[in-house]
Amino acid sequence: MSSLFKILSVVAVVFCCVGMFFLGGFSLHEGYNPVKPDIDTQFGPGYSEENFNKITEGIDSSEVIKLVGRPIGVIGSSSKLWYYSTDGKCKWQNFAWLARAVVIDRNGKVKQVQKSVRYD
């Protein structure tokens, strides 16, 4: 009787773990991955988080390019938002992603550095 109880206990634990995996791992809810926060983030070529952290307000846009390369895309006309990351790197699950962008003013200077976690 005790060996049957052990087998049933193991089966129950496995069943619960598999159920939790499918419910949590493949849910539609976009969660933050604390082990690998950038799991669903696509960065531009030449991007480095270490160098992005060196960007400060007031530096010239040419210095930004030296630090992290050209942006993935640019939005805006007078002030421009240079973005260095996008969503969708992870193909098997939808996770939160790390948004990295720089606002460049009409004089070519950094007006704002943007770093955030996006859930969309």
Image: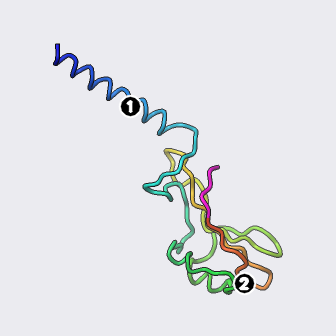
Span colored in magenta: 116-120
* Label of residue 18 in the image: 1
Does residue 57 show up magenta in the picture? no
Q: Secondary structure at mark 1?
A: helix
Residue at x-position 58% and y-position 77%: 69
Q: Quadrant of residue 4?
A: top left
Q: Earlier in the sequence, mark 1 or mark 2?
A: 1
Classify mark 1: residues with Cα within 10 Å, few (<14), some (14-19) or many (20+). Answer: few
Instruction: Report how many numbered discs are placed on residues in the image.
Output: 2
As displayed, is residue 100 above or below residue 79? above
Helix, strand or loop for the magenta stretch, by majority: strand
As displayed, is residue 43 above or below residue 120? below
Residue 75, position in %: x, y?
Answer: 75, 67
Q: Quadrant of residue 103?
A: bottom right
C-alpha distance separating marks 1 and 2:
52 Å
Name the residue beneath numbered marker 2.
109
